[in-house]
Image (cartoon, helix red, strand yellow):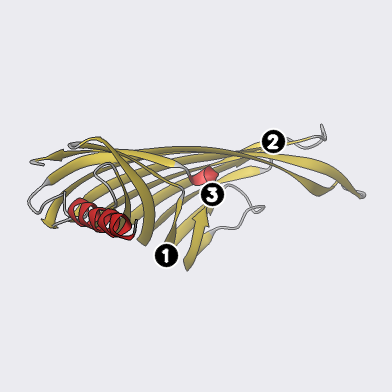
Amino acid sequence: MQKLLITAALSLIGATSYAQTIIKAGTVQLGGSVGYSQQSNDNSYNYYTGTSYLNTTQHAVYKSFSINPMAGYFVADNLAIGLSVAQNNSKTAYSYDSPDIAGGDQRNSQLNLGAFVQYYRLFTDHFGLVGTLNAGYTHGTSTSTYASGGSRGTSNGFSAALTPSIVFFPVPKFSIGASVGNVGYSHYTSKIESDNNVLDSGTSNGSSFGAGFGISYLTFSGTYYFGR
């Protein structure tokens, strides 16, 4: 029994070692990811009628769609570098239980042009993990529309994100991946122009760092490998 266990362990180690190098240097990959999310929130909302404050419920519905084509080259076994383009569009619509308050919405569009480093850790010929570090230039636009007025904004800056994902190979030349969020940093300069004095106008600088994981961040990807 002991010899059998030792033999099985050595076979597993050998299989794992082989699987770790099945994507050879010189391989070219072409693929990308798409993602869609929708969230709904209900919050208590106080508003001023002109004579007193009343309480109602605010309903917010957030929808987001993203697409991210990528092309890369394996400079070493399981290690690829490449270029990527990412486009994300989102909309948040607001409505209220009170007929005295008109609804509104906020729309955002963001374009990212960048480069990435990607490392594969394959446990079998069909399954593994992938870590992707992406960094690049970001340009965004936003519009807000309410009964009291609206605003338009632009932003430019730098962003970077580390995204872990799982990967499955149904065939050697094609993989399917899935991720549920990332750890990211961004630094930006934004400018807002308001239609009236209700909303603030001006230019601001800011930065953010944080992690977002969960089913609402679910993204699927597909990649084809040339020369594998």
Give yes or no for contact between labels 2 and 3 (Cβ–Cβ under 8 Å): no
**Label of residue 214 in the image:** 3
Looking at the image, is mark 1 or mark 3 earlier in the sequence? 1
Whole-percent x, y for residue 55 in the image: 87, 46
Looking at the image, is mark 2 or mark 3 earlier in the sequence? 2
Residue at disc 1, secondary structure = strand
Residue 116 visible in this rendered orientation of the protein:
no
Image quadrant holding the C terminus, namely top left
Q: Is residue 104 above or below residue 6?
A: above
- Judge from the rendering whether residue 19 lies leftward or rightward of residue 181; answer left or right: left
Whole-percent x, y for residue 226 in the image: 11, 39
Rounded to the nearest angstrom, the CA distance separating label 1 from label 2 is 32 Å
Residue that sits furthest to the right in the current view: 51
Looking at the image, is mark 1 or mark 2 earlier in the sequence? 2
Q: Residue at x 69, y 35 (%)?
A: 103
- Judge from the rendering whether residue 207 lies leftward or rightward of residue 197; answer left or right: left
Residue at disc 2, secondary structure = loop
Query: In this rendering, which labeled residue sits more in front, label 1 or label 3?
Result: 3
Whole-percent x, y for residue 202 in the image: 52, 61
Q: Nearer the viewer, residue 195 or 46?
A: 46
Rounded to the nearest angstrom, the CA distance separating label 2 from label 3 is 29 Å
> What's the residue type where badge 1 is placed?
Tyr
Quadrant of the rendered structure where residue 34 is?
top left
Residue 217 visible in this rendered orientation of the protein:
yes
- The residue that disc 1 covers is 185
- The residue that disc 2 covers is 103
> What's the residue type where badge 3 is placed?
Gly
